[in-house]
Image (cartoon, rainbow, N blue to C red):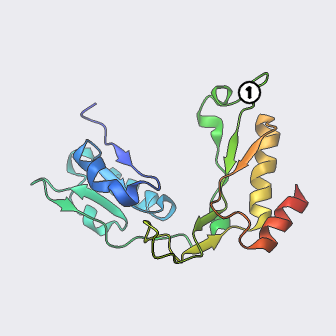
């Protein structure tokens, strides 16, 4: 699909953006997409696919290959400070039945209410996450769970936080709401 831009993102792009670009991605979002995606899409819409590189260096948080093959690596990594601003995921755009199992195998949906890690371990490979602890409220997490249950009648939910019990008060409040 030579006329389609391939955009790569996700937590793993913090460490392998160059690899993704060398193997076919046109643009990599290096950190959190919530603050980057709208300016990036506006930029692409304004410039068109054939000229997407023109001025792309003004969009924070993205990396790409220049026309001469050199890499533009994002140095500014915008982060969303208030995780309660993250919208509840709308799964209506996919076939949810593919993810809801029937019988003995339950379908599993994920709720993530945390970014980063509160600790600064010197052996940690992820410099970006060290000491960056941002959490959504228990209310936000609960509303996500309620939305998933009401819309898709799910019975299983996975909390995908690395440190769900930190801070303890949020974990306790969420569990009480459930």
Residue 100: quarter of image: top right
Label 1: how many residues lie within 10 Å, few (<14), some (14-19) or many (20+)? few
User: On the picture, is 32 further left or further right than 82?
Assistant: left
Which residue appears at 47% of the width and 56% of the height? 11
Q: Residue at x 36, y 59 (%)?
A: 15
Q: Residue at x 80, y 64 (%)?
A: 139
* x then y, percent, for residue 168: 78, 72
| Outermost front residue | 123
Report the side of 151 relative to 134 (left or right): right
Given residues 99 and 131, the one toward you in this image is 131
- Could you say where residue 131 lies in the image, as x and y percent from the top left? 54, 78
Left or right, 72 with respect to 80, comes to left
Residue 133 is drawn in which quadrant? bottom right
Q: Residue furthest right?
A: 176
The mark tally for this picture is 1
Q: Is residue 146 above or below residue 140?
A: above
Quadrant the C terminus occupies: bottom right
Residue lying furthest top: 103
The residue labelled by disc 1 is 105
The residue tagged with tag 1: helix, strand or loop? loop
Measured as percent of width and height from the top left, residue 42 is found at 38, 56
Tell me the residue at 26%/35% (across/down): 3
x%, y% of residue 63?
29, 59
Q: Nearer the viewer, residue 165 or 109?
A: 165
Can you say whether 62 is above or below 50 in the image?
A: below
Residue at the farthest left position: 68
Q: Nearer the viewer, residue 2 or 168?
A: 168
Q: Above or below — where is 84 with respect to 121?
A: above
**Rendered-image quadrant of the N terminus:** top left
Viewer-nearest residue: 85 or 55: 85
């Amino acid at each position: 699909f030579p006329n389609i831009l391939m955009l790569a993102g996700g937590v793993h792009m913090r460490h392998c953006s160059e690899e993704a670009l060398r193997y076919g991605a046109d643009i990599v979002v290096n950190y959190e997409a919530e603050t980057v995606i709208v300016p990036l899409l506006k930029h692409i819409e304004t410039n068109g696919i054939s000229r997407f590189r023109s001025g792309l260096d003004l969009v924070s948080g993205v990396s790409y290959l220049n026309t001469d093959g050199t890499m533009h690596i994002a140095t500014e990594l915008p982060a969303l400070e208030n995780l309660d601003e993250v919208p509840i995921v709308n799964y209506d755009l996919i076939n949810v039945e593919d993810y809801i199992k029937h019988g003995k195998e339950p379908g599993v949906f994920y709720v993530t209410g945390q970014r980063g890690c509160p600790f600064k371990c010197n052996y940690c490979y992820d410099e970006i996450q060290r000491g960056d602890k941002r959490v959504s409220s228990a209310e936000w997490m609960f509303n996500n769970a309620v939305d998933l249950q009401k819309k898709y009648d799910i019975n299983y939910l996975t909390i995908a936080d690395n440190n769900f019990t930190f801070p303890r008060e949020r974990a306790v409040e969420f569990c009480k709401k459930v």
